[in-house]
Image (cartoon, rainbow, N blue to C red):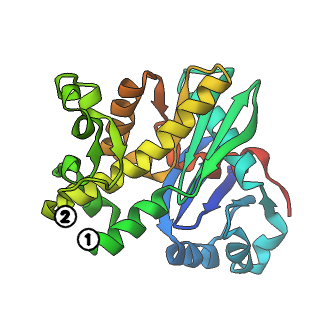
Amino acid sequence: MELVDLQIGIDAGGSLTKIVTIRDGKKEYRTKDFYGALELARTLTGYDRVYLTGCRAGTLEAHLPDNLKGRVYRADELEAFWAGAHKMLSEEGRPSDSFVLVAFGTGTSVFTVSSGKGTRTAGTGVGGGTLTGLSRLLIGITDFEAIMDLASRGNRHLVDLMVSDLYPDAKASPVLNELTAANFGSREVERSSKEDIASAILQLVVETIAVISIQVARAHQMETIVVAGSPTRHPLVRARFGELGALLGHDFFAFLEHGPYCGALGAIITGKRA
């Protein structure tokens, strides 16, 4: 009878639960909402080890079958994230000894990673939760894909006050014409559509994270900024980071193929017996 090594890493975040299953070295990735994750926890079977991290890890552990509770390992949420990102960079063939890592989740943490060790250097409450929360309040939509669809068709210039609105000569400069003077500060905001507002909400979130991470990179003399987390799976989010990098003089934003699962993979790497 063939023996199979089967382990699972679960990152139970504030909004989504990210899951990495490793079967004899082969990884599988999936995402569930929290209620789906609870159902998964109740029906898990056959795993040699279960690794948990994230703010809701304790709740998931309480729902595991009794025969798995002696096989549970817990990992610090922040340590798991940077450890998973470091591992993914290496597996993707672009290892880096030092880089800035952005954990773009419900909120956002910014790490410096050097010599395989990460340090939380900065952070903000602005993140995916801000994106969906403001969208709920302002345009009555909470579905991430629907928000992205609207944002892709909007013109944020009707919502945001631009540098070129304050300095007309700046309109001649493609760079200055795209710089924000004040998010949601346009005097024409009443003319804006749901699409325009969605675009401005996305800009507010990405711009805040980009500016903070660039400041960290410059302070620590690091070129590469790796942005990971569930929102980064969408091409529009990645494009906005790229546009802001070009505007702000930092062209080294990188994204991981399986970036949303850094914490889940990192839990497997760093987890200790509960």
Q: Residues within 10 Å of mark 2 (few under 14, many from 20)?
A: some
- From the viewer's perspective, is 91 left or right of 200? right
Residue 97: x, y in percent?
69, 20
118 relative to 32, above or below: above
> Which residue is painted at 47% across and 52% down in the image?
230
Q: Amino acid at mark 1?
A: Ile
Query: Tag 2's secondary structure?
Result: helix
Identify the image quadrant of the C terminus.
bottom right
Of the image marks 1 and 2, the number of the one nearer the N terminus: 1
Total labels: the figure holds 2
Q: Nearer the viewer, residue 151 or 31?
A: 151
Residue tagged by mark 2? 194
Q: Quadrant of residue 181?
A: top left
Tell me the amino acid under the disc marked 2. Lys
Neighbor class of circle 1 (other Cα within 10 Å; few <14, some 14-19, many 20+) is some
Q: Is residue 124 left or right of residue 202?
A: right
Residue at (15, 51) in percent of width and height: 153
Evaluate whether residue 3 shows in this view.
no
Give me the C-alpha separation between circle 1 and circle 2.
6 Å
Mark 1 element type:
helix
Q: Are marks 1 and 2 in contact (CB under 8 Å)?
A: yes
Q: Is residue 240 above or below residue 13?
A: above
Residue 159, given in percent of the width and then of the height, sits at 24, 54
Check the image and report above or below for 87 versus 145.
above
- Near-viewer residue (162 or 35): 162
Looking at the rendered structure, which numbered label has been put on residue 139? Answer: 1
219 w.r.t. 70: above or below:
above
